Image (cartoon, rainbow, N blue to C red):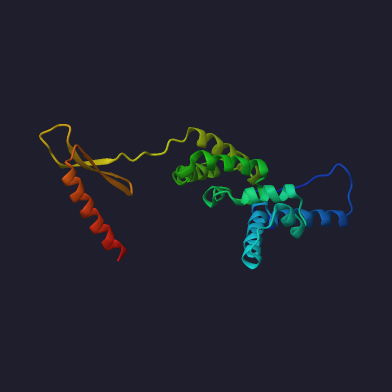
Amino acid sequence: MLDKGGTINTFTMLVTDDEITLSDAKALATSLQSVKEHSLREIGLRLERDKETYFKEYGEKLTQAELAKRHGLSQSKVSKALQAATVDNDLISVFPDISLLNHSDYKILLSTQALLGDQLCDFTEDLKSKANELKIAKGLIKEDLKDMLSKLIANESRSFKPSVDKAVVTTLIKFENKDQFARKKVKGRNFSYEFGRIPKQIQEKLDTAINEVLSGLES
């Protein structure tokens, strides 16, 4: 292919200190291919599906020890795989090859999820643009790119400041008494009404009006 003017962006070659036979080389290639096809996350997702199917069929939850026995894995591998399966898809999608991710990488991703909570979606959107810039600018092989992306996620999550939507406050009516107020607050998809120093009879009328509106939603 190279004789015909073709190019290869990256080429990975394994070198051994000792001589190995052709059959050993084939066995090693098969083993490496198996590892690539069954990443830690993919194993975890398969285990989760097995747990769900078993529970639907028998009404009982499989323990990690039982999962290990059913799938011919160690309990440690089962535990790590199940953790990898809980990482958010958006975070995983940043990496071009998830077969390269190891347990340490997944620990970083899980810590990022726990740290950011509801702000994870905003973080991943911001992260993807930076990750794309990194992929284009550096021209790295996949292994080095993975390491840099993991470090980027760890660093960015610590310094990430989500955009905060300010609440929009609307005055519903102005009172002569400065201690009285009636206003509406809107922040994102949430809204609320606030009242201060409102006579009890007005409160009761408001309660009645709100109950009538909400009861109409139920029907």
Res 153 visible = yes
Res 9 visible = no
- Image coordinates for residue 177, horizontal then vertical, percent: 12, 33
Q: Which residue is rendered at x = 88% and y = 50% of the image?
A: 20
Q: Which residue is rendered at x = 70% and y = 51% of the image?
A: 78
Which quadrant does the N terminus fall into?
A: bottom right
Nearer the observer, 162 or 185 = 185
Q: Quadrant of residue 34?
A: bottom right
Q: Which residue is rendered at x = 50% and y = 42% of the image?
A: 133
Which quadrant does the C terminus fall into?
A: bottom left
- Image coordinates for residue 88, horizontal then vertical, percent: 54, 50
Residue 135 horizontal side relative to residue 119, left or right: right
Q: With respect to residue 103, does 68 lie above or below? A: below
Q: Quadrant of residue 31?
A: bottom right
Q: With respect to residue 77, does 174 lie above or below? A: above
- Image coordinates for residue 93, horizontal then vertical, percent: 55, 51
Nearer the observer, 37 or 169 = 169
In the current view of this chain or complex, which residue is farthest to the left?
Answer: 176
For the image shown, how many numbered marks are present on the structure?
0
Residue 108 horizontal side relative to residue 38, left or right: left
Nearer the observer, 13 or 126 = 126
- Image coordinates for residue 49, horizontal then vertical, percent: 63, 61
Residue 79 horizontal side relative to residue 166, left or right: right
